[in-house]
Image (spheres, helix red, strand yellow):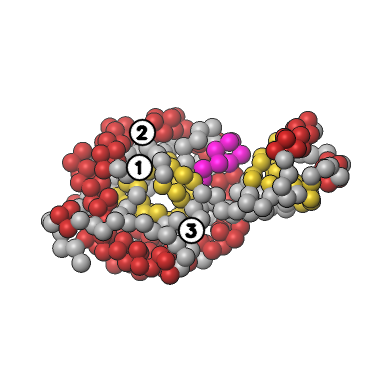
């Protein structure tokens, strides 16, 4: 259940209410909004606790939440969560673009791509050092060495970095190098990994399982939130359907649905969501129009020879830059802010930028 306080309640009184809740043997999570404070109660509470709280000074109402996910619910946290990472704000009206290759391959490759992502107006460099692949003989990534390569490229070009973490054992080392940790679709219900991610404060981008419902998705996010990490982003990356023309079916309705159910930022992945380069641009724009808080887009300087074999869904640098120029025009129309400097021509001298 949640406790909704009255307007202009003093912090001291909130502390007293929290102490009363915790003395009852349950957990209290405080969420301060613009108008009032909401205190979420997690755990098996005595049936009389709600009535006692309702009678306390400063309490406006006590509401029981029927959803299995509490902390991820908008009932608990009415205002949008905005995650601030070194000045880059993700959530609310902000639009953030994460760009880069599926996998880090060499220092030269990731440095050049970082330069191009920055020049185009992106804020986050993406790249996998550990790659969960369907087949055991596929390229699995270059490991910790790749983390160091990407961290250096991000720092050099003024970009945040995001990389995928696959096991609880690698959470700490990945968090040491990356600004955002990504949980891939195959690990959405790796509960040991989710619990471990709840023990750190590094922001997490959680991808939806390709056969998961919204309820299952939000319950996976709840594991991280319940562990104590409030910095969670939800990523719609396409679901498995009967259609074989596209790699997955990008569920655009997930964006407004998740935003109505949860306060967490919602990111769209049109690259994995379609698996086809020619569809990335229109589905990126459709995602922004649907209200996405950010995009994670694959871009590679030589997609035909990428080590992961996923080049068919990667944009060329000129396509990536042109897309971001269009987003700068589209974003204000749908109430989003996308601050990007004009891409310097010299950054794309080797590419036919449109």
Residue 199 location, quadrant: top right
- Disc tally is 3
Frontmost residue, 211 versus 61: 61
Residue at screen point 31% across, 61% down: 324
Work out whether mark 3 precedes mark 1 in sequence or the reverse, and give the earlier one.
3
Comes first in the chain, label 3 or label 2: 3
The disc at residue 161 is 1
Proximity of marks 2 and 1: CB atoms separated by less than 8 Å: yes
In three-dimensional space, the C-alpha distance between marks 3 and 2, rounded to whole angstroms, equals: 28 Å
Percent across and percent down for residue 31 are: 64, 44
Q: Is residue 195 left or right of residue 7?
A: left
Query: Relative to 200, is 303 on the left or the right?
Result: left
Q: CA distance from mark 3 to mark 1?
A: 21 Å
User: Where's residue 118, x and y in %?
Assistant: 27, 50
69 w.r.t. 214: above or below: above
The residue under the point 23% across, 47% down is: 115
Residue 174 visible somewhere in the drawing:
yes
Query: Of discs 3 and 2, which sits in the foreground?
Result: 3
Q: Which mark is residue 93?
A: 3
Q: Identify the element where label 1 is drawn.
A: strand
């Amino acid at each position: 259940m949640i406790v909704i306080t009255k307007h202009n309640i003093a912090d001291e009184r909130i502390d007293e209410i929290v102490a009363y809740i915790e003395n009852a043997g349950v957990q209290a999570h405080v969420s301060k909004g613009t108008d009032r404070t909401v205190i979420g109660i997690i755990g098996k509470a005595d049936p009389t606790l709600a009535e006692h709280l309702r009678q306390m000074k400063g309490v406006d109402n006590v509401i029981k939440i029927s959803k299995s996910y509490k902390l991820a619910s908008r009932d608990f946290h009415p205002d949008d969560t905005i995650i601030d990472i070194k000045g880059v704000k993700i959530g609310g009206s902000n639009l953030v673009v994460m760009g880069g290759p599926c996998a880090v391959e060499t220092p030269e490759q990731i440095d050049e791509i970082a330069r191009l992502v920055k020049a185009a107006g992106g804020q986050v460099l993406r790249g996998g050092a550990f790659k969960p692949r369907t087949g055991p003989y596929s390229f699995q990534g270059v490991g910790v060495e790749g983390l160091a390569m990407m961290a250096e490229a991000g720092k050099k070009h003024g970009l945040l970095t995001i990389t995928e973490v696959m096991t609880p054992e690698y959470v700490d080392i990945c968090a040491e190098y990356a600004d955002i940790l990504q949980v891939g679709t195959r690990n959405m219900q790796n509960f040991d990994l989710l619990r471990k991610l709840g023990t750190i404060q590094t922001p997490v981008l959680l991808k939806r399982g390709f056969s998961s419902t919204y309820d299952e998705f939000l319950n996976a996010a709840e594991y991280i939130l319940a562990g104590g990490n409030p910095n969670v982003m939800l990523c719609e990356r396409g679901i498995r359907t009967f259609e074989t023309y596209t790699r997955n079916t990008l569920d655009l309705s997930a964006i407004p649905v998740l935003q109505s159910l949860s306060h967490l930022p919602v990111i769209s992945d049109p690259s994995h969501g379609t698996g086809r380069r020619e569809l990335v641009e229109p589905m990126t724009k459709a995602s922004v129009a649907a209200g996405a808080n950010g995009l994670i887009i694959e871009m590679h300087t030589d997609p035909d020879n990428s080590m992961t074999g996923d080049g068919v869904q990667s944009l060329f640098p000129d396509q990536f830059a042109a897309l971001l120029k269009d987003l700068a025009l589209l974003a204000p129309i749908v109430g989003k802010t996308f601050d990007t400097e004009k891409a310097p021509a010299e950054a794309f001298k080797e590419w036919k930028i449109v």
